[in-house]
Image (cartoon, rainbow, N blue to C red):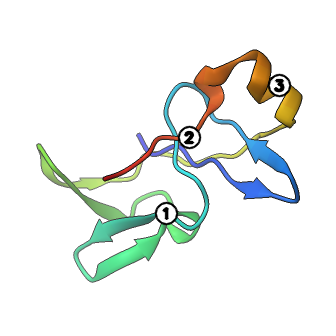
């Protein structure tokens, strides 16, 4: 499952326990693609299971105060 989080205008979008910030790149069979352009059905390259289809994406905005109250809403960091 791919979950998208987006940072815009001082707010942070939440999508549960796992997610990526807008601007993060994911690997696809055609090269890197920004996560906000990935759609349901697109194939992405995973570390453990090769190509996998995206099952869903969504965003939900939370305020900085909500993030401070619940740090689990922070986006995933890819290295």
Q: Image check: 27 left or right of 25?
A: left
Q: Say which of 60 and 75 sits in front.
A: 75
Which residue is labeled 1 in the image?
24
Residue farthest top in this picture? 69
Among numbered discs 3 and 1, the one appearing first in the sequence: 1
Q: What numbered label is drawn on residue 75?
A: 2
Q: Say which of 47 and 77 sits in front.
A: 77
Among numbered discs 2 and 3, the one appearing first in the sequence: 3
Q: Position of residue 50 (x, y in %)?
A: 12, 54
Q: Say which of 12 and 48 sits in front.
A: 12
Q: Residue at x 52, y 49 (%)?
A: 20
Q: Position of residue 9 (x, y in %)?
A: 88, 59
Give the secondary structure at mark 2: loop
Q: CA distance from mark 1 to mark 2?
A: 10 Å
Among numbered discs 1 and 2, the one appearing first in the sequence: 1
Looking at the image, residue 39 lies above or below residue 70: below
Q: Residue at x 29, y 61 (%)?
A: 44
Q: Image check: 78 left or right of 28?
A: right
Looking at the image, residue 11 lies above or below residue 68: below
Q: What numbered label is drawn on residue 66?
A: 3
Q: Image check: 67 left or right of 5?
A: right
Q: Position of residue 28 (x, y in %)?
A: 28, 71
Contact between labelled residues 2 and 1, with CB atoms less than 8 Å apart = yes
Q: CA distance from mark 3 to mark 1?
A: 22 Å
Q: Residue at x 76, y 44 (%)?
A: 12
Using a 10 Å C-alpha cutoff, classify the residue at mark 1 as few (fewer than 14 neighbours), some (14 to 19) or many (20 or more): some
Give the secondary structure at mark 3: helix
Using a 10 Å C-alpha cutoff, classify the residue at mark 2 as few (fewer than 14 neighbours), some (14 to 19) or many (20 or more): many
Q: Position of residue 31 (x, y in %)?
A: 28, 81
Q: Quadrant of the N terminus?
A: top left
């Amino acid at each position: 499952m791919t979950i998208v989080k987006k940072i815009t205008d001082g707010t942070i979008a939440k999508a549960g326990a796992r997610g990526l910030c807008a601007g993060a790149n994911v690997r696809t069979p055609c090269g890197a693609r920004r996560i906000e352009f990935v759609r349901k059905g697109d194939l992405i390259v995973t570390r453990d299971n090769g190509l996998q289809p995206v099952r869903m994406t969504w965003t939900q905005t939370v305020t900085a105060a909500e993030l401070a109250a619940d740090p689990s809403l922070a986006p995933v960091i890819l290295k």
